[in-house]
Amino acid sequence: MAAAVTLIEHGARVVVFEASRQLGGRARRVTLDGMDLDNGQHILIGAYTETLRLMQVVGVDPQVALMRLPLELRTASGFHLKFAPLPAPLHLAVGLLGARGLGFADRVRAARFMHGLRAAGFRLRRDDTVAALLSARHQSEVLRRLLWEPLCVSALNTPADRASAQVFANVLRDTLGGGRAASDLLLPRTHLGALFPEAAAGFVTRCGGEVRLGTSVRTLDAGADAIRLDTDPAPFARAVVACGPQHATPLLRTDPRLSGVAQSIEGLEHEPIYTVYLQYPEAVSLPFPMFGFTDGLLQWAFDRGALSGQRGLVAGVLSASGRHEALNHPDLATAIHGELAAGLPNLPAPRWTRVIAERRATFSCRPGLARPAIATPVEQVLLAGDYTASDYPATLESAVRSGVAAAHRAIGH
Ligand SMILES: Cc1cc2nc3c(=O)[nH]c(=O)nc-3n(C[C@H](O)[C@H](O)[C@H](O)COP(=O)(O)OP(=O)(O)OC[C@H]3O[C@@H](n4cnc5c(N)ncnc54)[C@H](O)[C@@H]3O)c2cc1C
């Protein structure tokens, strides 16, 4: 949808073919028992500049659709990091030095770690795992467990012992190391469909484009100056293949010139994300809209009552692969309730639970990973998606940026 909106902005005629009956892909609305939920609880940050810009283009006001909070990490174990109200980089340094739940030596180590990365322009001499970087920079076990590992797994959806240190450094550069606004947490006040894709479809159709739902493209047939798809008799000048990696490959394989690209995409490994919804009595709320847990399976709990008015509804997030994958859904929900109850005294039993497991939520963000470029050996075919080459891990922002870049390339900008 980011590519479609950008093409329309530049006067191109656009048809969007979406295999599903619903827009949004991995970041889509899911309606369960009459409730608008998300395929997975998502957070955005202030550094998502392209996503925020395009939301405005299609008529969504980020100030209304998102709750903006200065970065604050709070966990049930008593860890609390809050940015100081000072200009960058003092906001972080003073915030780290004042963090609760860390001893003085650890606060200094964390501040030194950030200072060292900043001094090197956030460029590492060679890419290694985040775990290796943290060891090399003398980060203690407590610091890793309370601060760096939760940040790594949330941002890269890959555990620190497998995650790319360079991509982690890029994320730290643009969040903790950026200006205060870049690190702000932006928590959706609405379901993900309304945040962008549904409004984007409205924009595309109002401007004369088409969005055809339930239409899966199965073949690409690129000639000298046009490309034909099995879904439409008319030729197109360009096709932006914006499927997730596992769906892009069969499509690309329909043109032998694209089999090398398909092969490189097939080389990507994936990590899951589980979202556990628990409906408690309406009076239940969390101490903070996004509350961390570091001692079990649960990583973050979101208070959907505080965010979107769904009172008593908690969304628990478990990023990346782990022990939880061995549990069946009812047992996992019971375990997550137990962990919530351990951190939140007097929590009653949930009335309703639901687990959404996205087994291929994102690619596994490993050191030195080769990700495919937007341009392909076939001029008429461009790729877009969170897995294409960029500085960033698989996020809404990397997907949007790739869509915008593919659109510019399609029109020769
Ligand atoms: C549970 C979960 C939690 C997440 N949390 C966060 C978060 O907090 N913050 C964040 O920034 N990111 C998060 N992400 C990552 C983010 O959702 C993805 O990076 C982003 O949605 C990827 O967008 P995309 O457009 O690249 O691909 P997708 O969202 O996969 O979209 C691809 C689309 O192509 C369609 N399609 C596939 N094949 C065809 C075909 N042959 N013809 C036509 N259409 C086709 C699909 O139906 C789909 O709609 C999360 C992801 C998950 C799963």
Image (tube, helix red, strand yellow):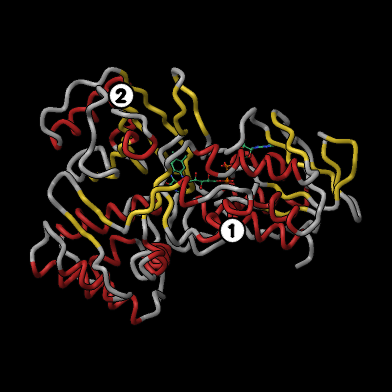
Mark 1: amino acid:
Arg
Q: Residue at x 30, y 24 (%)?
A: 279
Q: Position of residue 175 (x, y in %)?
A: 38, 64
Q: Earlier in the sequence, mark 2 or mark 1?
A: 2
Camera-side residue of 102 and 286? 286
Q: Residue at x 23, y 66 (%)?
A: 135
Residue drawn at 15 percent across, 66 percent down: 98
Counting other residues with Cα less than 10 Å from the Cα at mark 1, is it few (<14), some (14-19), or many (20 or more)? Answer: many
Please say if the residues under marks 2 and 1 sit with CB atoms less than 8 Å apart: no
Task: Tell me which amino acid carries mark 2.
Answer: Gln
Q: Is residue 356 left or right of residue 221?
A: left
The answer as to whether callout 1 falls within 8 Å of ligand 1 is: no
Q: Which residue is mark 2?
A: 279
In the image, which disc is placed on residue 109? Answer: none
Say whether residue 254 is left or right of residue 149.
right
The location of residue 201, given as percent across then percent down, is 67, 40
What residue is pinned by disc 1? 401
- Residue 326 visible in the displayed image: no
Q: Is residue 398 above or below residue 252?
A: below
In the foreground, 219 or 332: 332
